[in-house]
Image: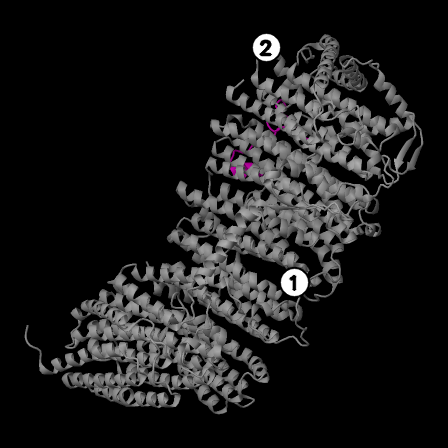
């Protein structure tokens, strides 16, 4: 097996870091830190995109990287920070499952996603194919984070992290989606954030808190 | 579509006319004059026309047509054959009487608007007709469910009464479940041809297993409609809840569509039924007959009593169906034809007699506002017309010669009697027991009917208010008369009817054409040597004897007739409350068949100044079968509801687990 | 329709009409003898009828026309029933028109009218009697039908004359099925004719009576018709029994007028024996409580069905 | 041209109403734009009838038998709902439940929502389909929370998060699809997400990838369809939003989502040549039908009741598409049509009923037929129609589905029978006392305008007795397109 070229090594390092970040998000309970981790994740994603763009010379990837930078590294974290300050939510409550348990499940999820990615990676022609497993793992770990959180804000952060994972996956499997789609997705994410912002204020106005246990009244079972 | 004259087209035109009459009622829905006094007689005319057409067409070969309605690949197919004609005749003739009666019956301010009633009523009639004519599964199901739906709305005419609402609900629920079952049966019968016409089903070859599944589903579905035990629970609730003409239609005609369905499925669509299916039908029929009649005997509500009696009669009819299948499956064509004729005859009979009785109760209800037998009595003085016409129905349904009920009973017993050669010993042993049960049920029906007539019309009025009761109006009498004449006619001229039914039976059972034996006045299924019944002669002799006796006694003994108070046996005050109540009259039956009833007694204390003994009789099957069923569903629903916790994390977990599980599945 | 047939028919009807009260009287006489009482004359029922016919009718104020019609209907059906039972000869033209099942139907008609008439006046006794009568009826009727069925299955016909003929021509022997049904039939006969142990025709004790309770409101000629009809009923039942179980001696088409001449004394002999037997049973048994009557009749029903099954199993 | 008009009209409407949505004539404008959309849809339909399916705008848009009737249906229900919402929202505003500002939001988002659905239906690009679906979610989130009550906020939040997460899975699925297609269609990626191209080469697509992709797509779009156990947002969102929105959510959005699932299923099945996708869909469908039937049993809120009924019907449709084959597909398409017409009609009637009663609780709504025969009969007939009573069209499709199931998947029929029975008992047992019986409510001075209800019911009735030949032709073509085992 020939040693990988330097840029690929870099890319793999990025991917590994992304996975690490996902784990730390899974265990992180301070919301401010969570947002910072998200910004970092965005930055890594941006870097990875740039690397791939440079390597393959595909123009639209640069644009994609720029979008990521603008939206996910700068825009959304800033927005979230503002919200945190305005709404005064810094801490998430005790997670549903304790941290070590969550980690263990996370580990299983990672193993599962690597297994899942195996057949796909084997088919892929892209140089980045080996990182697909990590993309899936990021998605599923973010999913897990959403499940274990009790504050609306941290759920949203995890949700955005899932989007990051999706982008990373798209990039590693196919060097990104067609431009139209990427633009559309970006627009959707932006709008989603705006809607969420509105939402947070509405929720707080009603419940004086962003704690999700207020949002558990519509149910069937006793 | 061919528009030239054919019986089929003419029948369809009548159905269309019914639909149009119904719609016409909605032009001015509040006008009683238009809806009741004008449109119902028109509907009755249509009924007569349909009956005439159907009778004329019975012996003619099947006709078919395709209507420009329905699903793209499945337009409505219609087909009239002898079997359909018999039931069409039943529908037309019975509904004519009921429609005439309805003309006078519906009054202002009773539940729904007259126009709406008119619409529902005529749609009900038309849909029943379409059920009989349908020749593909879709048209059949549409007509079938329209029938259920329109009758549901008729049942809930007085929807402000909670009991009527729950009766309607139960009715529609069971009807719907039954309809789904019928639909699934059609699904089996189409046999992978994806053709839902009955022709395709006739051509499809099913394995015995699948054929049994189809028969079972059909039996369940049609049995639910017919009110076979244990699917009968809706019937004693829904039939009494409806206005009386509708009760008459439901009991008299609608139940027969279920019989038609079973006959159509087992003999026509499935080809040759397997003989042991007959035992299933026979068993259910006998059970229903017995169960129905003992419950009828202990009822205190006159319409409910009649409803239970309908269960009994449906049971008898299904007994006949079962016999037919057993004989047919054993290759005994002639006997199968005899049993089938008995079945069809009883269908016709029951349509007339039950209609008379229900309409009679309708008149009583109108005159007195009372359904409870315990508050009626002595109405023969106030309502002689209704009383005497009802008496005909009572005697007929009790199976007494020379009226019609006896004829079908006689035929059925003959079929049982000659069953000795079924090539299966076990069945041979079983059939006589069946005959015994039929005999018992008929005798019990007599008991029930004496109670019904005696408590309502005879004796002293149990309530002071009854003194103001008035007899039925002219048109109502006319309707009753028509139906009562039907009972008499069917009773006195059975040969003519049976000759026609024989054609149907031979057609349905695919037997070679032949002629029904016997003279015009003498009913003899096999040969006069074996068994014969000549109602005209019997009736004539009895009548002559009665007349001679009456005239003779009067001529010879001219003693006076004095009126005096009834003998009080030494009691000082003999009042109406000393008569048997309905509960009292049912007491022997309650006593004898106690294990079948679920009774709650309310015994008065010795210190009670106005003591009242009350007993309510419940249906054990309701508590044993339906309540647990409902409880199970509720229990499951409670468990299922716990899935919806309200916590978003849980919901996300569901998605997560689903995703992981599916991915694992794919890997 | 042969002349002989017509003659037999007429003779039977007349004979039934005339002999029925005498048969009742004979039974009563026998019973009195057996109970060591002074017996009334055999003709006592005739005296009773004559007296009643000559009395005024007192109708309850509440009675409807059904009440006045019922005696004639009951009487008429009984006569019609007598006309189709082959008591003397089997060549009855009318029996073509009504077989065994129709006979049961006729008897049921009579019962229903009797009960309805009893309910008409609206006294406690009338309804009570009607209820009890119907209670007896609903079990007795199917039992009787089952009895007929056994005979019908043996001779492959439901026509009573043909059954009788068929049974006559069979070899003499022991038929277990017929034995069962004979017992059942006797029980039905007792119950249907208001005899002990089910009813006691001699008392008017309200707690136990059935038939008399229904007639309580009748008087004069109406009562006479009812009494006569009751006597006819007993006579008819006896003749049904003869036709089913001891049919020997009845005339057939083949035996000609001589047969008919012979049949009359044979019938009277049978009646005499049967009356004695009936009286014996009545003397030896005790009156059952009314609520035990269904059990008594259920036994009869059961026996009849058993007879049927035995017949099917043993094939005789 | 027609497509441009079709998509342009609601987009323009959204913009215009964003500006003027608070004016008194805004509801009229809303109707006007919806009418224009409907007119465009009709024109498009006419063109398709005349000249057959077509691909437009550099292959980005596609009109074929499968979506043309859905487009017309969407535009039609959009129009009737806007007609219904005019008096309905006026009363809401009079009651002070919505401010003029929110009415502006409402009208604008209503148009935007219509636009996104139409884009999702007409686009040929699976990526755009995703974008439009997401946009549809976003535009309705704010509508669901229009009343700003705690319950509506909760419902909106759940809707947003669950559908957001769900649809993210769909994006990943789309990506995997793209990945597989790219290997066949070339790396330039211009055509690799176009459905027509994918359909042409579906036999060469890599089965392993596609099966994974299908799982993600099914879970993703299935969340929007409301398949159990992914359905949890649906009853909340339907019950808490304004009734016109419940009507379009239930009647239209679910259809669009199921459309997306089926489009994907066609590709995956073509590649896999196995029954796996079918089995998954049948499993989801059955589970939804059964669970929804039991959920129905406990409902106390009328809109929630019918929301669960929607889940049940989506389950039936999914099950039918899962069975596949010309008959089942045909039935499923017909069912989509009649369900959306019927369900929206029911919501119209329910909306009026709840408004008159001042409560959505079933126990507070009694004897509607007494205070207003039109509302009462509308609700009664609508419920009976949705319960599969003939001669309404829902019965026609259920007839075909059940008979097919009896032949192809007999194991499923006891479950279906059970579920339909339980659902019937549950819904009818609750609707009957609402419509019939005594009522504490006062009789209305004027009959409410319920034209849309009866127009819908009349159409459903017609579809039960007569399906126009061209519609039947589309169903048949689409059924062939969808294929199946």
Using the image, name the chain to which the residue with label 1 belongs: B
Q: Residue at x 49, y 84 (%)?
A: D107
Which of A20 and D314 lies nearest the eye of the viewer?
A: A20
Per the image, the residue denoted by label 1 is: B23
Coloured how? Answer: one colour
* B355 part of magenta stretch: no
Which of C156 and C308 lies nearest the eye of the viewer?
A: C308
Can you say which quadrant of the picture contains the N terminus of chain B? Answer: bottom right
Position of D152 compared to A51: left or right? right
Q: Is residue A221 visible?
A: yes
**Residue lying farthest to the bottom in this orientation:** D19
- Determine the image quadrant of residue B173: bottom right
Can you say which quadrant of the picture contains the C terminus of chain B? Answer: bottom left
Query: Is label 2 or label 1 in front?
Result: 2
Is B155 located above or below residue D204 in the figure?
above
Q: State the SS at label 1.
A: helix
Using the image, name the chain to which the residue with label 2 belongs: C
Picture coordinates of residue C211 (x, y %)? 77, 29
User: In this picture, which residue range is highlighted in magenta?
Assistant: B504-531
Which of C307 and B401 lies nearest the eye of the viewer?
A: C307
Per the image, the residue denoted by label 2 is: C172
- Determine the image quadrant of residue C166: top right
**SS assignment for the magenta stretch, majority:** loop
Mark 1 surroundings: few (<14), some (14-19) or many (≥20) residues within 10 A: some
* B526 part of magenta stretch: yes
Is D338 located above or below residue D485 in the figure?
below
Asked if the residue at tag 1 contacts the one at tag 2, i.e. Cβ–Cβ closer than 8 Å, the answer is: no
Picture coordinates of residue D148 (x, y %)? 49, 82
């Amino acid at each position: 097996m020939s040693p990988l070229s330097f840029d690929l090594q870099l890319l793999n390092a990025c991917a590994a870091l992304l996975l690490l970040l996902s784990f730390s998000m899974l265990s992180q309970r301070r919301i401010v830190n969570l947002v910072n981790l998200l910004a970092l994740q965005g930055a890594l994603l941006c870097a990875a995109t740039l690397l791939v763009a440079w390597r393959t010379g595909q123009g639209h990837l640069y644009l994609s990287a720029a979008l990521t930078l603008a939206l996910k590294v700068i825009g959304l974290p800033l927005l979230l920070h503002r919200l945190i300050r305005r709404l005064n939510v810094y801490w998430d409550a005790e997670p549903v499952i304790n941290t070590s348990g969550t980690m263990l499940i996370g580990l299983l999820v990672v193993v599962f996603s690597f297994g899942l990615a195996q057949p796909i990676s084997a088919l892929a022609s892209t140089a980045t194919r080996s990182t697909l497993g990590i993309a899936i793992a990021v998605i599923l770990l973010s999913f897990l984070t959403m499940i274990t959180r009790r504050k609306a804000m941290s759920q949203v952060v995890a949700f955005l992290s899932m989007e990051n994972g999706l982008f990373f996956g798209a990039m590693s499997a196919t060097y990104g989606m067609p431009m139209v789609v990427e633009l559309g997705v970006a627009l959707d994410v932006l709008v989603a954030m705006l809607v969420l912002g509105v939402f947070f204020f509405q929720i707080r106005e009603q419940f004086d808190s962003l704690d999700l246990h207020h949002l558990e009244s519509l149910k069937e079972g006793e | 579509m061919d528009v030239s004259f054919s019986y089929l087209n003419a029948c369809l035109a009548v159905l269309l006319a019914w639909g149009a009459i119904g719609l016409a009622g909605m032009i001015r829905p509040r006008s009683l004059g238009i809806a009741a006094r004008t449109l119902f007689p028109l509907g009755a005319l249509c009924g007569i026309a349909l009956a005439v057409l159907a009778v004329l067409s019975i012996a003619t070969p099947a006709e078919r047509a395709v209507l420009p309605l329905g699903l793209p690949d499945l337009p409505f197919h219609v087909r009239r054959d002898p079997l359909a004609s018999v039931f069409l005749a039943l529908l037309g003739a019975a509904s004519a009487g009921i429609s005439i009666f309805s003309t006078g019956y519906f009054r202002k301010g009773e539940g729904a608007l007259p126009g709406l009633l008119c619409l529902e009523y005529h749609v009900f009639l038309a849909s029943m007709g379409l059920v009989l004519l349908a020749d593909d599964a879709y048209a059949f199901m549409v007509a079938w469910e329209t029938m259920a739906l329109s009758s549901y709305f008729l049942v809930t005419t007085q929807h402000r009464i909670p009991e009527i609402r729950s009766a309607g609900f139960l009715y529609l629920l069971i009807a719907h479940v039954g309809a789904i079952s019928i639909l699934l049966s059609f699904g089996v019968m189409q046999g992978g041809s994806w053709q839902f016409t009955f022709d395709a089903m006739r051509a499809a070859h099913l394995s015995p297993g699948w054929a049994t599944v189809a028969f079972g589903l059909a039996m369940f579905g049609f049995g639910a409609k017919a009110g076979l035990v244990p699917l009968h629970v809706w019937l004693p609730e829904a039939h009494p809840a409806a206005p009386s003409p509708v009760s008459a239609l439901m009991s008299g005609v609608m139940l027969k569509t279920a019989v038609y369905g079973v006959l159509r499925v087992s003999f026509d669509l499935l080809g040759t039924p397997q003989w042991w299916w007959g035992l299933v039908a026979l068993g259910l029929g006998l059970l229903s007959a017995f169960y129905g009649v003992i419950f009828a005997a202990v009822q205190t509500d006159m319409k409910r009593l009649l409803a239970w009696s309908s269960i009994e009669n449906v049971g008898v009819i299904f007994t006949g169906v079962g016999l037919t299948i057993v004989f047919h499956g054993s290759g005994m064509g002639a006997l199968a034809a005899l049993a089938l004729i008995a079945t069809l005859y009883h269908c016709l009979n029951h349509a007339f007699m039950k209609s008379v009785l229900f309409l009679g109760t309708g008149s009583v209800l109108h005159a007195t506002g009372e359904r409870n037998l315990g508050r009626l009595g002595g109405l023969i003085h106030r309502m002689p017309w209704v009383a005497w016409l009802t008496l005909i129905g009572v005697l007929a349904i009790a199976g007494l010669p020379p009226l019609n009920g006896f004829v079908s009973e006689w035929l059925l017993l003959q079929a049982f009697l000659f069953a000795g050669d079924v090539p299966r010993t076990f069945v041979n042993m079983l059939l006589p027991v069946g005959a015994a049960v039929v005999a018992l049920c008929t005798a019990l029906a007599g008991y029930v009917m004496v109670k019904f007539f005696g408590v309502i019309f005879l004796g002293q009025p149990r309530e002071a208010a009854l003194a103001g009761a008035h007899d039925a109006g002219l048109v109502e009498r006319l309707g009753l008369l028509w139906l009562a004449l039907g009972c008499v006619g069917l009773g006195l001229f059975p040969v003519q009817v049976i000759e026609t039914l024989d054609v149907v039976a031979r057609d349905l059972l695919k037997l070679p054409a032949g002629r029904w034996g016997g003279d015009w006045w003498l009913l003899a299924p096999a040969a006069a040597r074996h068994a014969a019944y000549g109602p005209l002669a019997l009736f004539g002799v009895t009548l002559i004897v009665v007349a001679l006796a009456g005239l003779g006694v009067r001529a010879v003994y001219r003693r006076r007739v004095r009126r005096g108070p009834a003998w009080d046996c030494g009691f000082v005050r003999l009042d109406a409350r000393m008569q048997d109540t309905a509960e009292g009259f049912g007491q022997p039956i309650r006593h004898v068949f106690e294990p079948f009833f679920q009774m709650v007694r309310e015994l008065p204390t010795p210190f009670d100044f106005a003591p009242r003994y009350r007993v309510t009789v419940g249906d054990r099957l309701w508590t044993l079968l339906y309540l647990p069923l409902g409880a199970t569903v509720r229990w499951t629903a409670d468990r299922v509801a716990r899935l919806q916790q309200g916590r978003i994390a849980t919901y996300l977990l569901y998605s997560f687990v689903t995703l992981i599980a599916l991915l694992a599945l794919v890997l | 329709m042969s002349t002989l047939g017509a003659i037999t028919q007429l003779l039977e009807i007349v004979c039934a009409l005339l002999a029925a009260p005498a048969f009742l009287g004979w039974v009563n006489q026998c019973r009195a003898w057996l109970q060591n009482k002074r017996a009334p004359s055999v003709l006592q029922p005739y005296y009773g009828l004559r007296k009643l016919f000559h009395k005024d009718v007192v109708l309850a104020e509440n009675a409807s026309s059904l009440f006045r019609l019922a005696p004639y209907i009951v009487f008429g059906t009984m006569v019609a029933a007598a006309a189709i039972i082959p008591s003397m000869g089997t060549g009855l033209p009318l029996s073509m028109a009504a077989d065994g099942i129709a006979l049961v139907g006729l008897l049921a008609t009579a019962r229903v009218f009797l009960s309805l008439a009893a309910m008409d006046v609206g006294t406690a006794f009338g309804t009570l009697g009607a209820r009890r009568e119907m209670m007896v009826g609903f079990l007795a009727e199917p039992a009787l039908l089952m009895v007929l069925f056994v005979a019908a299955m043996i001779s492959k016909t439901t026509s009573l004359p043909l059954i009788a003929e068929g049974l006559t021509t069979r070899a003499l022997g022991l038929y277990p099925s017929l034995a069962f049904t004979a017992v059942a039939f006797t029980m039905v006969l007792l119950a249907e004719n208001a005899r002990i142990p089910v009813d006691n025709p001699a008392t008017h004790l309200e707690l136990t009576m059935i038939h008399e309770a229904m007639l309580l409101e009748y008087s004069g000629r109406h009562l006479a018709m009812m009494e006569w009809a009751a006597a006819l009923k007993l006579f008819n039942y006896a003749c049904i029994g003869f036709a089913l179980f001891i049919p020997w001696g009845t005339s057939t088409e083949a035996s000609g007028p001589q047969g008919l001449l012979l049949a009359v004394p044979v019938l009277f002999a049978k009646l005499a024996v049967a009356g004695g037997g009936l009286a014996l049973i009545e003397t030896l048994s005790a009156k059952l409580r009314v609520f035990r009557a269904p059990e008594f009749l259920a036994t009869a029903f059961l026996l009849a069905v058993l007879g049927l099954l035995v017949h099917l199993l043993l094939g005789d | 041209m027609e497509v441009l008009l079709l998509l342009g009209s609601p987009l323009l409407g959204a913009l215009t109403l964003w500006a003027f949505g608070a004016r008194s004539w805004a509801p009229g404008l809303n109707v006007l734009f919806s009418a224009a959309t409907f007119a465009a849809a009709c024109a498009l339909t006419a063109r398709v009838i005349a000249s057959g399916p077509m691909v437009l705008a550099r292959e980005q848009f596609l009109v074929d038998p499968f979506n043309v009737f859905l487009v017309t249906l969407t535009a039609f229900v959009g129009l009737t709902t806007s007609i219904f919402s005019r008096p309905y929202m006026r009363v809401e505003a009079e009651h002070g439940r919505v401010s003029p500002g929110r009415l502006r939001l409402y009208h604008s988002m209503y148009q935007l929502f219509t636009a996104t659905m139409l884009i999702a239906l007409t686009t040929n690009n699976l990526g755009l389909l995703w974008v439009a679906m997401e946009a549809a979610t976003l535009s309705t989130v704010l509508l669901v929370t229009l009343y700003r009550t705690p319950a509506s906020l909760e419902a909106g939040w759940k809707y947003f998060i669950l559908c957001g997460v769900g649809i993210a899975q769909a994006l990943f699925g789309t990506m995997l699809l793209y990945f597989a297609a790219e290997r066949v269609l070339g790396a330039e990626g211009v055509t690799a997400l176009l459905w027509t191209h994918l359909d042409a080469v579906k036999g060469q697509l890599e089965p392993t990838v596609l099966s994974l992709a299908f799982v993600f797509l099914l879970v993703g779009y299935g969340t929007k369809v409301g398949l159990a156990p992914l359905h949890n947002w649906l009853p909340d969102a339907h019950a808490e939003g304004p009734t016109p929105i419940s009507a379009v959510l239930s009647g239209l959005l679910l259809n669009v989502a199921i459309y997306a699932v089926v489009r994907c299923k066609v590709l995956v099945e073509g590649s896999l040549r196995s029954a796996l996708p079918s089995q998954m869909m049948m499993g989801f469908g059955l589970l939804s039908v059964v669970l929804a039937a039991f959920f129905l049993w406990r409902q106390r809120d009328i809109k929630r009741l019918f929301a669960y009924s929607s889940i049940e019907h989506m389950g039936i449709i999914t099950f039918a598409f899962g069975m596949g084959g010309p008959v089942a597909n045909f039935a499923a398409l017909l069912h989509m049509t009649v369900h959306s017409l019927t369900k929206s009609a029911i919501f119209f009637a329910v909306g009026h009923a709840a408004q008159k009663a001042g409560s959505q609780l079933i126990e507070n709504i009694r004897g509607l037929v007494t205070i207003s025969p039109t509302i009462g009969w509308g609700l009664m007939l609508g419920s009976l129609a949705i319960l599969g009573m003939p001669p309404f069209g829902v019965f026609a499709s259920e007839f075909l589905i059940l008979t097919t199931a009896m032949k192809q998947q007999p194991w499923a029929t006891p479950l279906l029978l059970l579920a339909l029975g339980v659902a019937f008992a549950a819904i009818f047992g609750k609707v009957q006392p609402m419509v019939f019986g005594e009522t504490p409510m006062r009789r209305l001075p004027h009959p409410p305008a319920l034209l849309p209800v009866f127009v819908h019911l009349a159409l459903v009735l017609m579809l039960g007795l007569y399906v126009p030949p061209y519609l039947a032709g589309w169903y048949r073509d689409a059924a062939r397109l969808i294929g199946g085992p």
